[in-house]
Image (cartoon, rainbow, N blue to C red):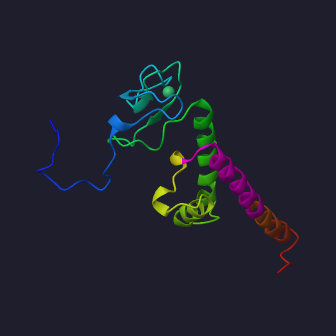
Amino acid sequence: MKDKNKSKTKKKKRKGFQAGNMRCPYCGSTVVYRSADGIYYDNSKGIMLYVCSHYPQCDAYVRVHAGTKIPVGSLANHELRTLRRTAHQYFDQLHQSGYMSKQDAYQWLADLISAPLSEAHIGHLGEYYCKQVIEESRRLLGRYQGQKNKKQFHLMRGGVAS
Ligand SMILES: [Zn+2]
């Protein structure tokens, strides 16, 4: 087993991550690494989670990056998970719509939350910044969509404009 592989390699890049030190941000309980069975309605993909040890009284958890034990962000309760999901959908549209590149989108996110690029991940955001991401993305996408529609409108009228 890989205990402390001190001798083997230098520390991996993501040093300092220790599940043992993790505490639930809501109730302060310890956090358990376990399968999402019984938490996810469908866990056929065998997702692993970090879950508050007071689950289900305290409904806080976060999944890990597939194939690792590294959480995708901080533990979140139902409300925050929903917000993050929505924020991610809007954020993804920023680059999927062609409005900006994926790289630019992450830079935009970093600027929005005043954090370095390495920390610009929706999974790290609290409620306040999730709402900011949703609001700002919607505004940008609305404007972008508006511009596209205008262009189309002119084209339909015979391409006279600009
Ligand atoms: Zn908790």
User: Which quarter of the rendering shows the N terminus?
Assistant: top left
Q: For this rendering, which residue is in front, 45 or 39? A: 39
Find the residue positioned furthest to the bottom: 162
Q: Residue at x 49, y 36 (%)?
A: 75
Q: Residue at x 32, y 49 (%)?
A: 16
On screen, residue 55 above or below 120: above
Q: Quick check: is 137 in the magenta stretch?
A: yes
Q: Position of residue 74 (x, y in %)?
A: 48, 41
Q: Which residues are magenta?
A: 125-144
**Left or right for 2, reference 23:** left
On screen, residue 28 above or below 98: above
> Residue 111 is drawn in which quadrant?
bottom right
Find the residue positioned furthest to the left: 7
Q: Main secondary structure of the magenta part?
A: helix
> Residue 80 is drawn in which quadrant?
top right
Q: Residue at x 41, y 22 (%)?
A: 37
Q: Quick check: is 123 in the magenta stretch?
A: no
Find the residue positioned furthest to the front: 28
**Left or right for 15, reference 102:** left
Q: Position of residue 96 (x, y in %)?
A: 59, 57
On screen, residue 96 above or below 29: below
Q: Position of residue 88 (x, y in %)?
A: 59, 47
On screen, residue 160 above or below 33: below
Q: Residue at x 26, y 54 (%)?
A: 12
Q: Position of residue 81 (x, y in %)?
A: 57, 36
Q: For this rendering, which residue is in front, 39 or 33? A: 33
